[in-house]
Amino acid sequence: MTAKIPVSVLGATGTVGQKFVQLLAEHPWFELAAVAASAASAGKRYGEVVRWREQIPLPDRIGALTVRECAPPLPGPIVFSALDAEAAGPIEQAFARAGAYVVTNTRNHRMDEDVPLLVPEANADHLVLVDRQRTARGWSGAILANPNCSTAGLVLALAPLHRAFGIEKLFVSTMQAVSGAGHPGVASLDILGNVIPYIGGEEEKIERESRKMLGTLGPAGVEPAGFLVSAHASRVAVLDGHLETVSVGFGRRVTPEDAIAALREFAPSPCVAELPSSPRPPVEVELRADRPQPRLDLERGRGMAVTVGRIRPCPILDLRLVLLGHNTIRGAAGQGVQIAELLVADGRVEQ
Amino acid sequence: MTAKIPVSVLGATGTVGQKFVQLLAEHPWFELAAVAASAASAGKRYGEVVRWREQIPLPDRIGALTVRECAPPLPGPIVFSALDAEAAGPIEQAFARAGAYVVTNTRNHRMDEDVPLLVPEANADHLVLVDRQRTARGWSGAILANPNCSTAGLVLALAPLHRAFGIEKLFVSTMQAVSGAGHPGVASLDILGNVIPYIGGEEEKIERESRKMLGTLGPAGVEPAGFLVSAHASRVAVLDGHLETVSVGFGRRVTPEDAIAALREFAPSPCVAELPSSPRPPVEVELRADRPQPRLDLERGRGMAVTVGRIRPCPILDLRLVLLGHNTIRGAAGQGVQIAELLVADGRVEQ
Amino acid sequence: MTAKIPVSVLGATGTVGQKFVQLLAEHPWFELAAVAASAASAGKRYGEVVRWREQIPLPDRIGALTVRECAPPLPGPIVFSALDAEAAGPIEQAFARAGAYVVTNTRNHRMDEDVPLLVPEANADHLVLVDRQRTARGWSGAILANPNCSTAGLVLALAPLHRAFGIEKLFVSTMQAVSGAGHPGVASLDILGNVIPYIGGEEEKIERESRKMLGTLGPAGVEPAGFLVSAHASRVAVLDGHLETVSVGFGRRVTPEDAIAALREFAPSPCVAELPSSPRPPVEVELRADRPQPRLDLERGRGMAVTVGRIRPCPILDLRLVLLGHNTIRGAAGQGVQIAELLVADGRVEQ
Amino acid sequence: MTAKIPVSVLGATGTVGQKFVQLLAEHPWFELAAVAASAASAGKRYGEVVRWREQIPLPDRIGALTVRECAPPLPGPIVFSALDAEAAGPIEQAFARAGAYVVTNTRNHRMDEDVPLLVPEANADHLVLVDRQRTARGWSGAILANPNCSTAGLVLALAPLHRAFGIEKLFVSTMQAVSGAGHPGVASLDILGNVIPYIGGEEEKIERESRKMLGTLGPAGVEPAGFLVSAHASRVAVLDGHLETVSVGFGRRVTPEDAIAALREFAPSPCVAELPSSPRPPVEVELRADRPQPRLDLERGRGMAVTVGRIRPCPILDLRLVLLGHNTIRGAAGQGVQIAELLVADGRVEQ
């Protein structure tokens, strides 16, 4: 095997940044070459400044890295961004201008016409937007985005159904984990024994991002899917894992059996299916009545699979179902890493 | 003032039974005259056999009551039933046959044609089913039921909107507290840091009971409301309080402003509005973006009000909103007590 | 009755500040005349800037108050301080210099020789330190402090035992609620499904403050009690209520029966016992094996009583026991209000 | 490598039984050959009757096993017992009489003079009690026990200190996870947002079992260690992991540095250190101020290590510290598996 590809992480001390570090620590293709964070941390050892929250211990090699500032150049052709949205804009653009592929978890560029917003099993073909972006912006690099944490699982679960039957209407009510808000994020005084039925901006993201990702690539860019989305987003006292109840209607009549078959037969392109982070299968169909549950089903596909259960008729639309996705893996860092893998498999980054 | 009306509680040691006892302990019209429970407890002092879970201490007078068996006669014209559904059937019927008004929290008779299923602010007129029931069954008493815990709040919140605009379609996704399952109920191993997206039978109850209660009283009984209901019921790690996200469509276009006005103007009949347990107002409209929340809003109207918030347009139907109801008060014992008060106010039970 | 005494609250928007506001809103002796907070809030209506977290709604009258800056003068002879410790020092001193009795929840002056640190049932006699303070500092007002939240309950529970038997050794391991850290305080990501066995500075406070409060007033000030204290402080996923396991040894042999008798017979001075906030009894003895529990026993004495249970022999010292105190009432705002009541009852503030 | 040793599990459907199944599913020395459970489950496929609660999916091979009755013979020389204490007595004895080594998690025989109660790193030499047991009881097999879940971690953490310095006095206050009570175990209504300061029989087990395991093997059996133990046992809203605050005194003065050195230098016999389940190191010393925490440190040594932190002076005895052990691995099934490994390494069971 050839040498691994060096990569860097921006915002490496935060919750999502730590997850990037953990996933990259043992990655078969990538080698974490640099971690960058705020000026206050730059120059210190990563192991000193990070308040490491993962159960897996921080590898010594990475703990010993000197934290870099968030400015180009950083080692490697790919830079993962776990920056705060407030700070990310100019930094990510500077890296893209300087020639890096910036795979970002921030919301800033997700809806830009020329930025691919990717769940590779669902829309790897949108990757070509990168070319348009580089031309339009005159950059030697590019920005690619993973969707918001509750949309990633939703789109992965719905892609097979949309492809097979054509979604027309979609109701979704989410029950989202506190890790989605980062650290310190949600105060324990606010969420212990409680539900907060509001997450700022989340419903709009679900509505917009799902249509873009399930949209069609045309000559003028991505034509968003035409279905209507009505979302409710709530925060619950769960650490990791976003559970979503869904009612969905299609252009034709669809039974639960139809849907189960479509989910089980869902086969991403071989290029995507064989990425190191791609779970097999990407969608786990669960027939037990009380599943999926965050506690029991979250780690499927090492956090990259989405689990769909309770597939049953809907008295108003066609189907009701419940889905579960891992918000910091499929919904954030794991999704970013898989997008970077796609850049390699697609030949845009040399192995 | 005249003497209080003696009443009895069946199943007085369980979670809902204790709530009945607490609410009746200081009731202005009723005096708790007897508590009844399983044969294992009968003959002992209530204070010895109950594992009292309420924060308010058990009054000495009630703790000293000797537990009775669940068989007629028990003191008073009204008997509250917090029995398990498995045991309740013949017992409740025996009491009704023997002349008592049985106000029951069990599901057994809720959908019987001649049994009023009541949220008095919404459908006090259904009370006349009692006459039909007594005639049809040849009973000198009757059975009256309160709805299932998640339906009570839903119906109270929707009644003003249904009256004003006519509901056609209703999506509801619930996040229900563990107290809804009684004690021991949900195992802590199952719910800590988790969500269980399934509550056996709950979705069917929501769909059926809401249509019956918002239905129209006709010569042949209650004609269920014609709207379609699609429900998802989930259990969350909350002690008390069922939160529900709702999308609702009407026969005409309805704006959030229309809905807020209808909810605020909602005025139950004076007879109902002046019952001791009736909250004023019955529906609290909440304009803060992140409300209602179980922890903060549950005690409104001493647990008898429903709080409705996040009233906003729905991209598919007319409105989205979030509602919160107290599952063991409005959704169980408090609702039962209010129904009994209605029997008094209506002149069926003499004060 | 004469007019109520006007009082003011510093730091009125925080967690403890809100609790002061709630307790003072319906106080029989005091009238909340002014609320003060940071410069960012000053000049706005209290109802606009406070993120009210209490279940009891904010009274309209108080919501309409204009927030004042934290500088003298503010109305009334008594000022309650719920300021952050970092900011409190010069502000509180300025008020004392300007003639106010400052009853503070901050730690800054608790261990000052001339500042009374008070749990009135235990050491109301320490109030005379106020005279010394005024003389020594040349102030027309004075500072009085309530103890840290875990020490208040501990001292109230132990005072009767120390008086009767003389404590020599004390082990205490606390399980403290998140409200003790204020808002936002403990991040939900850190405490959900977890225990944090460390609270910065807490163990030292328990060790020092308990000895001062149970110490003896002499000509040279308070002589701290001579017993040894070994404390472990942990944070648990509880909203309100600090539970503490205690092993205690005395100068003579003490049986559980002796201790129960001493706790039950404990009678504060009539002056203290009759303060509006003083619970009757101050110490609740609980004989049920699995009590006290935060959920079930916290509200005793409206949060001002301490509950002591599991009084049993200790294989090493004399006794083991478990105690529960309300950390934001007895351990903070409620304790502050009771101290202010003592100032009135003692004649230092005119009614 | 030779063939694996067949083993069986009694009580395989319960919480601890499932953990045995999971640990044995991929064991390098053992092959799970049979699962046994109550008569109601016997004859059915294990996958049908078990309500599998582990995150790792149940292996198909094991799911396909037919559940056996809990009576000898079952395959293999070693039988793991996760039976309820009420049922275990005669069943375990029948297996031992029939020639099996019964490694039991139940409390029934732990304190029998001739039954080894083992944490192998601490007292592997007690294994010879097996010979005495077989002679005395005339059995061809024998019973070996692992300690109660909170004692296992305690003894592993204290063994190095007891060996080095000789414990004289020990205070321990536990905060125990709900999985320690099995499923359904603790009701969510009882523990959500709460602490229960009582676990029936637990304190006595800690006091007795720790002295037996740290006792000395003599000609007449195990002479319990002479130190005094005072325990408080509480239940907290944590899924897995028992945290314990400890104050400990020795026969000589011991500083934190002494203790850290002794813990770090602790080296079990090579025979024990090389068992497949033995963690390296067995005791993890943690210097960060707020550790160990169940959420972050529980999986160390795959749940078999104990983590000790906050080692600091005690104002009364010598040291204070906090320890964390995994209650269903080190404190139950993992401990049982390690004991079985010791039987193999010791040559009592042929590989």
Image (spheres, coloured by chain):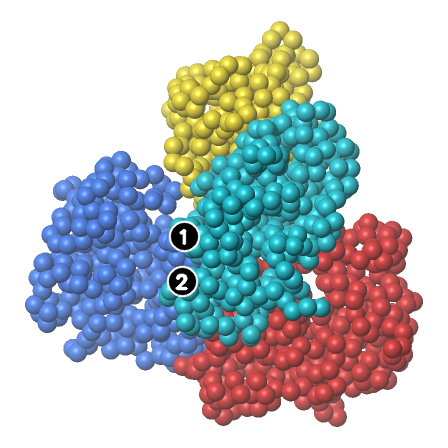
Chain colours: A cyan, B yellow, C blue, D red
Q: Is residue B88 left or right of residue B331?
A: right
- From the top left corner, tell me how far across and down residue A134 is, in percent: 52, 48
Q: Nearer the viewer, residue C114 or C180?
A: C180
Eye-nearest disc, 1 or 2: 1
Helix, strand or loop at mark 2: loop
**Residue B312, position as x, y percentages in the image:** 45, 28
Q: Nearer the viewer, residue D189 or D75?
A: D75
Dot 1 lies on which element? helix
Residue plotted at (78% across, 63% down): D21
Up/down of D317 relative to A246, above or below: below
Towards the viewer: A245 or B187: A245
**Could you tell me the amino acid type at mark 1?**
Pro
Q: Which residue is mark 1?
A: A90
- Classify the position of the C terminus of chain A by image quarter: bottom right
Picture quadrant of residue D37 = bottom right
Amino acid type assigned to the residue bearing label 2 in the image: Ser
Q: Residue furthest top?
A: B219
- Splitting the image into 4 quarters, where does residue A160 fall? top right
The numbered disc on residue A38 is: 2
User: Residue B96 bears which disc, if any?
Assistant: none
Q: Is residue A43 above or below residue A297?
A: below
